[in-house]
Amino acid sequence: MDHFAPRRVRADLRIEPRIEPRTEPRTDLHAEQTAKESAVPPALADDFFRLAHDDTTGKPLLHPRAVGIGLASALLGELVCGRRIGIHAGRVYLHDHTPPEDALAHATFAQLSAQRQYDGVRTWLGFLSRTASEDVAARLWRAGHLRPVTSRWPLRHAVTYVPTDTLVAVRPAIRLTGRLTRRERLDLVDAFLACLCAATGLDRRLLRDAPPPVREHTAGLVHGAPAPLRELLTHTVAAVGDAVLAYRT
């Protein structure tokens, strides 16, 4: 894993790359997407945030490091699905230099574009995971889906983001659990979310009442994912494993 301390880049920064992008290998990124779907990238990180937090209290359901890495992967996944970046051989490649309209996706893309000397997937998972929880929570707060609640402890103040509507917060879990249990053919968004749950260990909670065939079906979704997302998920699994190991030691 590369070690670096990249600058934070403003979301409103005009991106003008100073170097020519690398030649990108061909991939099957959009084999399962229509032109309409790829034109409007999904907010994958929003749904993963909801899946990874209690729909009533807002408390994380995983270790914070696993949540951060999962959200970092989802933010990169948004750019992959939005045709802004590709992933091959452990590296991130630019597809398009046009910044996304969403402020958070724009900020993430600006980081990647402005600091092309760092192109390792693991590098960016590690860097983005440092602030991914706060960044995605802020996006959901601006959209009116979360509200900050400050708990006052003797030595510090802790902020928890509580859902403003429990029905909205629980919707991704209900949708994903139902579709997986029925073993339906999943679209690209839900397939990636299911794989991301498996990569971070969240599937143990999501499918705790599901029979073994459903778990096996979920595990097999990774093999059917488009190549860039499949590679992103592979690096996510490794990053979560390293984070958990470092925490235990």
Image: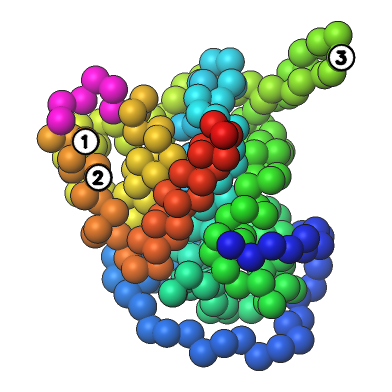
Q: How far apart are the two marked residues, 2 and 3, measured between alpha carbons? A: 43 Å
State the SS at label 2.
helix
Residues in magenta?
A: 207-212
* 42 sits to left or right of 114: left
Give the position of the N terminus as an image quadrant.
bottom right
Q: Nearer the viewer, residue 69 or 165?
A: 69
> Please, is residue 67 above or below residue 157 in the view?
below
Going by the numbered disc 2, the residue's amino acid type is: Ala
Give the position of the C terminus as an image quadrant.
top right
The residue to which callout 2 is attached is 219
The residue to which callout 3 is attached is 155
Q: Nearer the viewer, residue 215 or 169?
A: 215
Residue 208 lies in the magenta stretch: yes
Going by the numbered disc 1, the residue's amino acid type is: Arg
Going by the numbered disc 3, the residue's amino acid type is: Leu
The residue to which callout 1 is attached is 215
Disc 3 versus disc 1: nearer the observer:
3
Instruction: Answer whether labels 2 and 1 touch (C-beta < 8 Å).
Output: yes
Q: Residue at x 28, y 22 (%)?
A: 208
Percent coordinates x, y for residue 204 in the rendering: 33, 28
Crowdedness near tag 1: few (<14), some (14–19) or many (≥20) residues, C-alpha within 10 Å: some
State the SS at label 1.
helix
